Image (cartoon, helix red, strand yellow):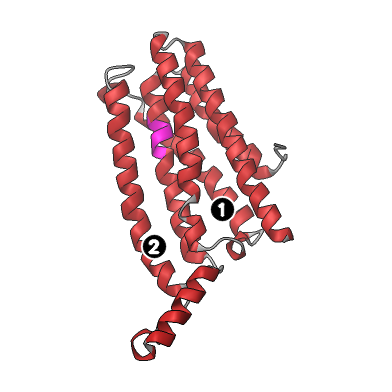
Amino acid sequence: MHIKNTPSTYTLIGANLLPLIGVLFFSWSLTEILLIFWAETAIVGFFTFWKILLSKKIDDQEVQTIQKLKESNPEKYNGLKPGKTTKFFLSVFFPVHFGGFMMGHAFFLIALFGDVGTPLQHIDMKGILFSLSTLFISHLFSFFMNYIGKKEYLLYSPQQLILQPYKRIVIMHMAVLFGGIFAEALGTPIYALIILILGKIVVDLFSHAHEHKEVNQLSIT
């Protein structure tokens, strides 16, 4: 798959390189790296929430379903409008479900790696927050450049958008999981953490490229 040289690609790479700097120059351990990657999930969820709210694409199946409901009972279902009803439901459902997903993921990481790396009370919280702020800016830049600027809100319905982060995050965190196990097995030397971070960047780039490849195909058809 071809990865295009776009500004959003460069910001993605730049933001993901900060954990590498932390490992090389500030003695970050597996704990800091996994904490950053886990917290980035919340950033992805935040922008997915706004994508759902701003989406202008109406699902064809939803239109047909609402039409049938109105025909079966006009008085009861006359107020239903395609798009708005589902958008409201998903904007409430998604944060709850995604929050549960993040909690489950956190417990899983603690169970696997809780006794590895830096104790939580000694982690470099300022560095982690700075790294997360750059990741937030990267996602914010992509949001305005691609979703708003390229009018991707016309191409994806809320039903499609709610599935997008799970596809990307599951693939990314599977890579992080196996990378973390690999790093732990080697005693978390610096080179193992470097491989973990670079592997995550590669997965992120391909996920980003795949997402916007789908957008290009949709805009053509």
Quarter of the view holding residue 115:
top left
Residue at x 67%, y 43% (from the top left corner)? 7
Residue 145 image point, x, y percent = 63, 53
- Kindly identify the amino acid type of the residue bearing the numbered disc 2: Ser
Callout 2: SS:
helix
Q: Identify the mark at residue 143; answer none if there is no mark.
A: 1
Residue at x 72%, y 39% (from the top left corner)? 5
Magenta region: 35-39
Q: Is residue 109 magenta?
A: no
Residue 66 image point, x, y percent = 45, 78
Q: Earlier in the sequence, mark 2 or mark 1?
A: 2
Say which quadrant the N terminus sits in.
top right
Which residue carries the number 2 mark? Answer: 91
Q: How many marks?
A: 2
Residue 137 image point, x, y percent = 52, 45
Quarter of the view holding residue 173:
top left
Say which quadrant the C terminus sits in.
bottom right
Q: Nearer the viewer, mark 2 or mark 1?
A: 2
Q: Is residue 77 visible?
A: yes
Horizontal side, residue 209 vs residue 89: left or right: right
Q: Could you tell me what secondary structure mostly forms the magenta stretch?
A: helix
Residue 17 image point, x, y percent = 55, 28
Residue at x 43%, y 15% (from the top left corner)? 183
- Kindly identify the amino acid type of the residue bearing the numbered disc 1: Phe
Callout 1: SS:
helix
**C-alpha span from label 2 to label 1:** 17 Å
Residue 214 or residue 133, whichever sits in front: 214
